[in-house]
Image (cartoon, grey):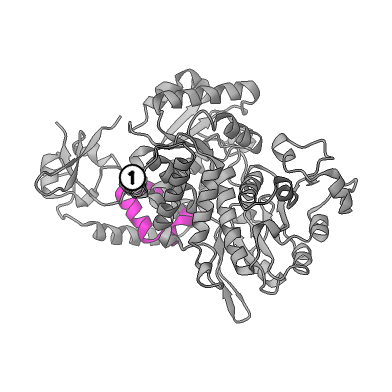
Amino acid sequence: MIDFQTVYDQSTGEAALEVGLTGSLLLECPIFNKGSAFSEQERSELGLLGLLPAHIANIDEQLTRTYENYQQKTSAQERYIFLTSLQDRNETLFYRLLQEHIAEMLPIIYTPIVGIASQHYSHIYRRPRGLYIAYPHQDAIEEMLRNAPYADVRAIVVTDGERILGLGDLGIGGMGIPIGKLALYTLCAGIHPATTLPILLDVGTDNQALLDDPLYLGWRHERVRGPAYESFVEAFVQAVMRVFPNALLQWEDFAKHNARLLLDRYRDQLCSFNDDIQGTGAVTLAGLLAALSITGSQLIDQRIVILGAGSAATGICDQLMAAMIAAGCPEMQAKAALWLVDSHGLVHAGRMDLEPFKRQYAQPLDRAVAFRLAQPTGITLADVVRQVRPTILIGTSAQPGAFSEPIIRAMAEHVERPIIFPLSNPTSKSEATPSDLTVWTDGRAIIATGSPFPDVWFGDCMFRNNQCNNVLIFPGVGLGVLASGARRVTDAMFVAAARALSELSPVAHDSAAMLFPPLEQVRQVSRYVALAVGTEAQQAGLAERTTPDELARRVDGLTWTPRYLRLKHKH
């Protein structure tokens, strides 16, 4: 493992890093490398003389040069490759560049372009990052964890690559997601990159195109399932608890049949959460609370239809239920407001094909009959919209075009300000585009999407696109958990995060403004969310009680700023 230590000059108080690497090995370490910005003293002390051009640049010069090179890339995938290569060379410069151009570059390093990159992962692979834990090596999981490049791992994101965004089984290509998520932990919440660890559980793939690809880098085997899979994950969890007992683990992009199972099985054993379930639910709740402040109505008075009934949809239901119950709504009344529609139609208790995680949100059969919805061929989304007359329509189905013009117009007939959130990622999987939704509702809809879309002109009005982006939630949650020392992550922490985010909505001051704060404010947002999460953890008895000021100091103490520190040789 790479060793380093922060030290402070006794006379000036200036921070410096003591490192054990010198010469070309130091230049190969992205967490320490400054490129042309190493000082004369550092070049002399650290064996760098002759290895760098004579001019000593500052970071602003490097940013100018790097952004110029970035702009010369002619496709989004080339820009993704450029940025990840920069991350592998010089992490400080990478994060400074992203900070300077966050709105422009966030869609490149994460959705939607990370999906394209993940599909071609084995073809654009440059350098390893994180850990690849393959099923044939399950007896060496602990050894692999101890091979992580840095010892002080605090945040882990893990996937098995089976359900990457809305793109399905990408096998080892799923590694792009943990890498991207952890880059957002650092960019948006300041969690130090040397304390993060992306992990890919390689249990094979059922994607035949990957298995037939001669360049595919993963284990060439059909997916391991059933007891063998569960045993492998159990061995992984136990090894994490031994090697990194104080780390926060985020489950990411597992298939719906595993996502809820793993969350429920391990949430009380280690400090962990699932962003697809809880993070998506929280940012959606925050967006809905902001939208309802425009309409002047309450969450408990809504009729909510959700297309898709997988982990994201049930996670949204979890958060909506928790928020409604906290507002004094009885549980049965809260459940009655939620109508899920999957690929077989309305989710209701009369269906025999429902997985357990869907059944908890199934509408009673007698209620479906009362709404004249019981049809032998299945109850479609159009049927549900026509009969339920939803005030809120949410999409998590990854079915492009599923929110068709007739469905949207039918909804808009009965609602003055329909709230429509097509949340599926990437852009190609969205249930509808904001431009179509705006036209079909005569500009009355309040819209938020999962991926970025262009702003929309309707008549003389421009409608800014609201992206319901988990990046406004999960980095702050992670920061709050780590700063407070919370032993577990609860749904109540995500409700607290959602309420904190909704309090920062620009619509609180201007009803024509955006639902979410601009990305340029994401660090302030993450800090506010972290304080809310840490406070909830303390009140729930899951973290040491402190004063609000002390919690704020701990949050700020964990927040890393991408700037060059002086390097000193550790003898």
Which one is nearer the viewer's eye here, 94 or 266?
266
Instruction: Report which residue position mark 1 lands on.
Output: 554
- Whether residue 35 appears in this view of the structure is yes
* Residue 92 is covered by the magenta coloring: yes
Q: Residue at x 65, y 51 (%)?
A: 328
From the viewer's side, name the closer residue of 500 and 37: 500
Which region of the structure is painted magenta? 84-108
Q: Which residue is found at the position 20% from the left and 33% from the top?
A: 20
The local secondary structure at tag 1 comes to: helix
**In the drawing, does residue 327 fall left or right of residue 60?**
right
Image position, residue 129 (x, y; %):
40, 37
**Outermost residue, top side:** 139
In the rendered view, would you say 250 is above or below 427? above
Q: Amino acid at mark 1?
A: Arg
Residue 147 location in percent, x, y?
A: 37, 27
Secondary structure predominantly adopted by residues drawn in magenta: helix
Front residue of 419 and 439? 419
Residue 407: name its quadrant. bottom right
Residue lying at 51% horizontally and 63% vertically, measured from the top left: 505
